[in-house]
Amino acid sequence: MSNEPLHVVVTGAQGWLGSRVVERLSKPHKVTGLARSDVDCTDEAHLRSVLASLQPDILLHLAGSTRHRSELNAMDAHWRDGVVATKNVLEVASAARVGHVILAGSMEELGDAPGVLTLDTPAKPLTEYGLSKSIAREFSDFIARTREARIDWFRPCAVYGPGQRGNMLVPTACEAAVRGTPARFTDGRQQRDFLFVDDLLRWVELLIDLRPTATGRLNLHHLGTGRAVAVRDVLEFIASSVPTARFEIGALARRPQEPDVQIAPELSTDDPAIAVWRAEVPWEIGIKKTLDWWIGQSR
């Protein structure tokens, strides 16, 4: 294995995860972070020009739409930024002979599948976001098989950590607790797999440092702790840590047919070289670090 630094290009570099990936990989590799203002991945000609000038060894595609299902034109946004953009990224990267492409998928591709979400769990998305990711993954598989490319598709469980904002459970609860605003939740009896962002970054770093070769198939990875944690436990931990929290747990009804448990398998991949990875940060420590960041923002 060569120790020469690699040139890694990261799309979505201004996003929460993308900015942390760029920071994490900058030593020892050369990393170029691309925001939407640098390149619109739905513009194939511009993307082709940018990659031709950068000539990356690895392309890590994290850009995409964050539209919520209730927002206007959410499906259009997911199709454009999830399906069309990914198609362009893969075709342009293949033409530019980029040796390795890594793409972020989502457990939402699997819909309401219950229990341990193994690698052979069929995709049955129930959201526009999950559907767009599922279609993009099928195209990724097609490119990997027909062009003998190295393509890795990773599906993380509920990723959280300092700096994250948005309508996901952890940032929503942390922000409401710190601000002292009322927040309503379901009974929280459902159990989920909470993955601290630093553990995800370690996995990305490991995959890149392994410098894997082409396999002629899509390499699928499910990333999580493998531990089921009740949503209620997370909410109560946050509430007990922040005196200003005003949570109403049980005020909302759960979605019909929502599974009681969804977690990642203990083995994150069928690739033995990467299977050495394990999540290390217990959820209590990760939530405390995340809360500390929110508290710092409020001062």
Image (cartoon, helix red, strand yellow):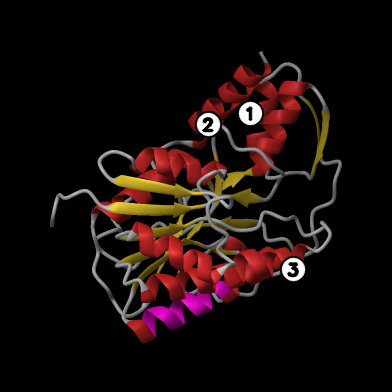
Q: What whole-number distance in Å separates the C-alpha atoms at marks 3 and 1?
A: 38 Å
Q: Is residue 44 visible?
A: yes
Task: Name the quadrant containing residue 75.
Answer: bottom right
Q: Nearer the viewer, mark 3 or mark 1?
A: 3
Magenta region, mostly helix, strand or loop? Answer: helix
Is 11 or 1 nearer to us in this picture?
11
Task: Name the quadrant containing residue 245.
Answer: top right
Check disc 1: other Cα within 10 Å, few if <14, some if 14-19, many if 20+.
Answer: some
The amino acid on which the numbered mark 3 sits, given as a three-letter code, is Asp
Q: Report the residue at 13% width, 55% height from top.
A: 2
Is 84 or 128 nearer to us in this picture?
84
**Mark 2 touching mark 1, by CB under 8 A?**
yes
User: Which percent across, then down, holds residue 262?
Assistant: 59, 58
The amino acid on which the numbered mark 2 sits, given as a three-letter code, is Glu
The residue indicated by pointer 2 is 284
Q: What whole-number distance in Å separates the C-alpha atoms at marks 2 and 1?
A: 8 Å
Task: Name the quadrant containing residue 123.
Answer: bottom right
Q: Which mark is residue 76?
A: 3
Q: Of the residues under marks 2 and 1, which one precedes in the sequence?
A: 1
User: Which percent across, then down, holds residue 211?
Assistant: 23, 59
Check disc 2: other Cα within 10 Å, few if <14, some if 14-19, many if 20+.
Answer: few
- The quadrant of the picture occupied by the N terminus is bottom left
User: Which percent across, then down, holds residue 52?
Assistant: 37, 65
